């Protein structure tokens, strides 16, 4: 930034306020629409309504973005000022001043960002943006400094003086005073607060705090005004009072009596609030002041009241019908979580644990109601006839081992990079991302949740989309490829236990002392008994991976730092290791995670281990796919080993006869690795 030491002495010539009078009328306090002094709290909102920070108790007679003309935000007026500049004579002072005002007002104020207090109104892809005050040169900053004192439109006076001081002559205290006074002149009333006054007061306080002792008296006066406004406020002031409480708490040290008075006021207002959400925020505002007083009992009591307001929200949602059952469950979760933050001793003394138990029973009933209220969404049918016929042809008429290998590679594994890329592409610009997503089990347990989001999807949101897409893939592959091919293989061949036992003995993947279990698991699946198959094989998959990692020198143990007791890592921890990617490849690792250990997916490993596997899940497409994937783990490495060694004599007499043909067809069927 250039040195502007002589800027205050620059005389740009006579500036005539008539140039902008129609666009920037004087800011008059009586033009603002205020609540009556005796206005009570608003009527309770209708059931199912969702109050926002911009709630209104009635229509605003002047409802444009900036409110009444004298109090409209500078960025709203920028276009009108630009039009005035374009209509002014070329190279005239009128054009220069109105143009400088237009550019200074176009940016959005970031009141608490000291380094960059303004951001562009528009930012285009590639880095292009609308003008910023930092783009103004010395001459235009001098014009703003000269125009600020004659601007009767106080929001624009604040902007002009602020920009001229921030990017120009910071030694000009009169200019800074002008900006602060103009910011503080904006009314502390609800309709103005969310449009203009909130940012104005935050910016004024930030400027005063940065200036230090020179502003101590004016800062104290401003905080006193905020305190008085809180104490005079009513529930109809809404979230403005919450914002004022936060501003007061972060900006000054109030004495104990005043702090207590403010805290009591918020507790009173919370009881008068017309909706539970506002009541919770008012209670939390009270809690912050009570914490500064060290009154833990009062803080705990506020926590109990906040939980009760979550319950009230749940009751409102349930009263509005089935469509709000899931929303009610969210509030019940919040109520339980809020009460659990209380110390155990307080919970026992006040009987809170019994209340938590009652809420949990209510939540369980709500979960069941949520499942009943869900609507099945069906798409147009997909014709899989061609895939069914092709899969059957792929395995028909082959020797026994070759048919089994062809079945194991009947469809390629997931391309991990493409799966993530597709998930990111599907999430970009999707309206559904604004809303949260939850996953429930058949017994009503909520096992996964993805919150609503804007901006770029994060890793967890992308992984959630990968899981959802993979679930669709599993259903199609099982019905279109695996089951039709298995029907042909089971019809043409008899897979007895001796054959499968020899196969598992020979497979380089099956751990010693686990051969019979693997053989029985494969045998159950080949007979179509998938519940028995996955009950045996899914737990064995964990030991298979552990054994394979150990053979490559990977440590799979965790050691208690105190006792030295060693424990084996579970399947989820094993799959999370980078060594698992090197061993399995990204596609197979992704599929094992998605099928076996992710709560948002089938979660077959954990449900099987803990007895949570239902009849429906045991016969599902996921169970079929999991059996097929584990079959692939056994037979494909054996196939490669036999092909490399050309040791067909060690296999079944029919197993090696078509081995070269199977290897040659792998490219058409998919990569077996």
Image: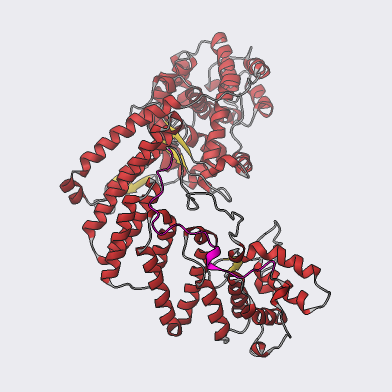
Q: Is residue 75 visible?
A: yes
Front residue of 216 and 64 = 64
Q: Is residue 559 above or below residue 358?
A: below
Q: How many marks?
A: 0
152 relative to 323 in the view: left or right: right
Q: Residue furthest top?
A: 491
Q: Quadrant of residue 484?
A: top right
Residue 647: quarter of image: top right
In the displayed orientation, state which residue is furthest to the left: 349
Q: Residue at position x 60%, y 72% from top?
A: 159
* Residue 647 is covered by the magenta coloring: no
Counting from the top left corner in percent of width and height, residue 284 is at: 34, 56
Relative side of 424 to 88, left or right: left
Report the quarter where the N terminus lies: bottom right
Q: Position of residue 204 (x, y in %)?
A: 50, 73
In front here: 649 or 338? Answer: 338
User: Magenta: predominant secondary structure element?
Assistant: loop
- Magenta-tinted stretch: 22-46
Type of colouring: secondary structure
Q: Which residue shows up at 68% across the image and 29% down it?
A: 667
In this view, the residue in front, 600 or 623, is 600
Residue found at x 80% / y 78%? 92
Q: Quadrant of residue 654?
A: top right
Measured as percent of width and height from the top left, residue 193 is found at: 50, 61
């Amino acid at each position: 930034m250039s040195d502007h030491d002589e800027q205050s002495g620059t005389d740009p010539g006579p500036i005539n306020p008539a140039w902008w009078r129609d666009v920037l009328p004087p800011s008059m306090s009586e033009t603002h629409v205020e609540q009556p002094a005796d206005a009570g709290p608003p009527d309770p909102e209708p059931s199912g309504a969702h109050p926002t920070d911009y709630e209104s108790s009635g229509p605003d007679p002047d409802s444009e973005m900036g409110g009444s003309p004298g109090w409209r935000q500078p960025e709203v007026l920028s276009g009108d000022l630009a039009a005035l500049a374009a209509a002014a004579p070329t190279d005239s002072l009128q054009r220069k001043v109105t143009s400088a005002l237009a550019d200074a007002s176009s940016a959005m104020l970031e009141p608490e960002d000291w380094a960059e207090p303004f951001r562009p109104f528009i930012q285009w892809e590639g880095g292009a943006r609308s003008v910023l005050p930092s783009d103004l040169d010395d001459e235009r900053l001098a014009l703003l400094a000269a125009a600020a004192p004659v601007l009767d439109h106080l929001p624009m006076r604040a902007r002009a003086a602020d920009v001229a001081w921030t990017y120009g002559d910071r030694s000009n205290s009169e200019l800074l005073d002008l900006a602060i006074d103009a910011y503080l002149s904006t009314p502390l009333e609800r309709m103005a607060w969310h449009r203009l006054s909130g940012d104005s007061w935050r910016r004024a306080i930030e400027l005063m705090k940065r200036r230090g002792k020179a502003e101590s008296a004016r800062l104290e006066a401003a905080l006193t005004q905020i305190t008085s406004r809180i104490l005079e406020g009513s529930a109809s002031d809404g979230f403005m009072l919450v914002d004022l409480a936060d501003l007061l708490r972060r900006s000054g040290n109030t004495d104990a009596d005043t702090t207590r008075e403010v805290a009591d006021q918020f507790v009173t207002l919370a009881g008068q609030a017309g909706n539970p959400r506002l009541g919770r925020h008012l209670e939390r505002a009270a809690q912050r002041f009570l914490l500064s007083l060290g009154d833990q009992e009062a803080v705990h009591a506020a926590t109990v009241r906040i939980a009760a307001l979550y319950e009230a929200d749940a009751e409102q949602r349930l009263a509005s019908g089935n469509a709000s059952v899931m929303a009610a469950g969210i509030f019940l979760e919040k109520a339980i979580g809020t009460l659990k933050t209380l110390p155990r001793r307080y919970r026992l003394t006040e009987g809170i644990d019994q209340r938590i138990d009652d809420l949990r029973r209510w939540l369980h009933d709500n979960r069941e109601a949520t499942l009943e209220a869900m609507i099945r969404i069906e798409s147009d049918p997909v014709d899989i006839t061609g895939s069914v016929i092709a899969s059957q042809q792929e395995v028909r008429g082959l020797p026994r081992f070759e048919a089994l290998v062809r079945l194991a590679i009947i469809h390629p594994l997931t391309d991990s990079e493409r799966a993530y890329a597709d998930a990111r592409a599907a999430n970009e610009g999707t309206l559904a991302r604004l809303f949260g997503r939850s996953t429930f089990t058949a017994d009503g347990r909520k096992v996964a949740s993805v919150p609503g989001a804007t901006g770029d999807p994060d890793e967890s949101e992308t992984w959630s989309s990968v899981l959802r897409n993979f679930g669709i893939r599993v259903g199609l592959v099982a019905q279109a490829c695996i089951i039709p091919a298995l029907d042909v293989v089971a019809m043409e061949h008899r897979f007895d236990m001796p054959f499968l036992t020899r196969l598992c003995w020979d497979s380089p993947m099956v751990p010693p002392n686990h051969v019979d279990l693997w053989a029985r698991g494969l045998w159950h699946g080949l007979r179509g008994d998938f519940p028995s198959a996955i009950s045996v094989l899914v737990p064995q998959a964990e030991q298979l991976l552990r054994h394979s990692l150990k053979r490559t020198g990977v440590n799979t143990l965790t050691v208690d730092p105190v006792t030295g007791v060693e424990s084996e890592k579970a399947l989820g921890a094993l799959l999370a290791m980078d060594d698992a990617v090197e061993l399995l490849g990204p596609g197979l690792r992704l599929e094992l995670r998605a099928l076996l250990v992710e709560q948002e997916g089938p979660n077959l490993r954990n449900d099987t281990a803990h007895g949570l596997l239902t009849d429906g899940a045991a016969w599902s497409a996921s169970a079929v796919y999991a059996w097929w994937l584990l079959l692939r783990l056994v037979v494909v490495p054996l196939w490669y080993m036999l092909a490399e060694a050309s040791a067909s004599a060690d296999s079944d007499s029919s197993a090696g006869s078509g081995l070269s043909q199977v290897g040659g067809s792998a490219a058409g069927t998919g990569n077996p690795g």
